[in-house]
Image (spheres, grey):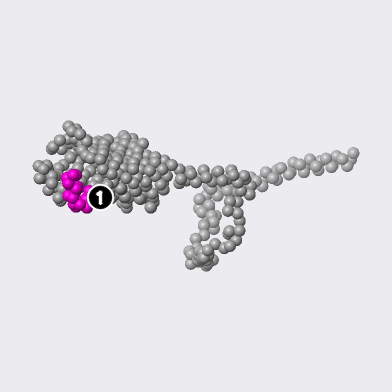
């Protein structure tokens, strides 16, 4: 009992002294900072040694130069030349057939081919369906093209003609062609042309159509009639998009004949030329009314024949029409 009392007394004294000493240590550090904040001069002196060191220049960093020079070691390796190595052909042609039914894979490949180049599509484009106002009798013109097939081979049907509102159809023709792609943007076209008016006449047709450089759409063809007459025609036009919906389309057309054709009132040489422009507004991409103006003239011997018949060989036409496709 005599020893227990001193022991308890010592333990109590230790427990009281330990928190006190801890409190004094932490508060002592805080008090030191507050005292420096109250004296700016002292604080400046105290932090004088804490100024950031000046950044070394590149010249003072010798280790940086070798790192930059290492980029030179990343030069592209030389590509192997020659044909693929033999081991490239050791595997099966269609490795997926090792894991899936070959018939199902063949059907999947056929669908993939049809969906990426061999699919068939069709379009009907009425490029011109217009009324013409001129000094003489007013008239109308149509020019339509339709095709159906693949990007490589297609069936093409064309029709164009003109006439007077007060009279009958003056010229009308239909062409049935096979078109085969001979370039990314050009088709070779061959087939037959049938003139319905002013008289029935058949022709063999051979030409090309597509997109020339500078986005010029062209259609050129030679025709050999069942009577041995060789004629030709070339058309070119360019769409100049003024706004998203307003398009100015300059257009030229020329026709020629290799010989006189009295029944068609044409002479050898360039028989007809036309140049004009149409301004259309695309209400929808597929539907666009337009207005325009065009100068049209008979040339050469054909112009002489027109004058001899009392007709004006040239004139200006004011146009209003509709362009649509689907």
When the figure is inspected, residue 48 is found, relative to residue 314, above or below; the finding is below
Q: Place residue 193 in its image quadrant.
A: top left
When the figure is inspected, residue 241 is found, relative to residue 165, above or below; the finding is below
Seen as rendered, the residue at the extreme right is 1
Q: Is residue 258 magenta?
A: yes
Residue nearer the viewer, 314 or 54: 314
- Residue at figure coordinates x 43%, y 42% from the top left: 120
Image side of residue 48 versus residue 198, left or right: right
Whether residue 30 is visible, yes or no, is no
**Label 1 element class:** loop
Residue 243 x %, y %: 30, 41
Seen as rendered, the residue at the extreme front is 227
Residue 146 x %, y %: 35, 40
Q: Which residues are magenta?
A: 255-273
Image side of residue 229 versus residue 148, left or right: left
Density class for disc 1 (Cα within 10 Å; few <14, some 14-19, many ≥20) is: few
- Residue at figure coordinates x 66%, y 47% from the top left: 25
Pointer 1 residue? 228
Residue nearer the viewer, 277 or 273: 273
- Residue at figure coordinates x 70%, y 45% from the top left: 21
Residue 298 x %, y %: 16, 46
Residue nearer the viewer, 252 or 60: 252
Locate the C terminus and report the quarter of the image it occupies.
top left
Q: Is residue 129 magenta?
A: no
How many marks overall? 1
Residue 321 x %, y %: 25, 36
Locate the N terminus and report the quarter of the image it occupies.
top right
- Residue at figure coordinates x 37%, y 39% from the top left: 123
Seen as rendered, the residue at the extreme top is 166
Whether residue 222 is visible, yes or no, is yes
């Amino acid at each position: 009992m005599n020893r227990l009392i001193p022991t308890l007394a010592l333990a109590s004294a230790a427990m009281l002294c330990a928190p006190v000493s801890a409190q004094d240590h932490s508060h002592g550090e805080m008090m030191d900072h507050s005292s420096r904040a109250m004296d700016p001069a002292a604080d400046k002196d105290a932090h004088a040694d804490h100024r950031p060191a000046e950044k070394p220049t590149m010249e003072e960093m010798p280790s940086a130069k070798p790192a930059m020079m290492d980029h030179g070691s990343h030069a592209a390796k030389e590509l192997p030349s020659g044909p693929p190595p033999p081991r490239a052909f050791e595997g099966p042609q269609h490795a997926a057939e090792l894991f899936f039914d070959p018939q199902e894979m063949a059907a999947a490949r056929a669908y993939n081919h049809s969906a990426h180049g061999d699919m068939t599509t069709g379009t009907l484009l009425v490029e011109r369906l217009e009324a013409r106002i001129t000094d003489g009798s007013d008239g109308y013109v149509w020019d339509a093209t339709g095709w159906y097939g693949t990007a490589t081979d297609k069936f093409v049907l064309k029709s164009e003609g003109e006439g007077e509102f007060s009279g009958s159809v003056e010229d009308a023709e239909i062409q049935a062609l096979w078109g085969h792609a001979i370039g990314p943007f050009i088709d070779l076209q061959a087939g037959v042309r049938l003139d319905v008016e002013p008289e029935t006449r058949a022709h063999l047709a051979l030409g090309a159509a597509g997109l020339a450089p500078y986005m010029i759409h062209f259609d050129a063809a030679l025709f050999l009639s069942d009577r041995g007459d060789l004629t030709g025609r070339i058309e070119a036009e360019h769409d100049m998009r003024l706004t998203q919906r307003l398009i100015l389309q300059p257009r030229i057309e020329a026709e020629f004949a290799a010989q006189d054709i009295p029944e068609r009132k044409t002479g050898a040489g360039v028989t007809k030329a036309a140049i004009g422009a149409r301004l259309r507004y695309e209400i929808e991409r597929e539907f666009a009314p337009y207005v325009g103006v065009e100068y049209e003239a008979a040339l050469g011997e054909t112009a002489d024949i027109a004058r001899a018949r009392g007709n004006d060989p040239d004139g200006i036409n004011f146009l209003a029409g509709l362009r649509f496709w689907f």
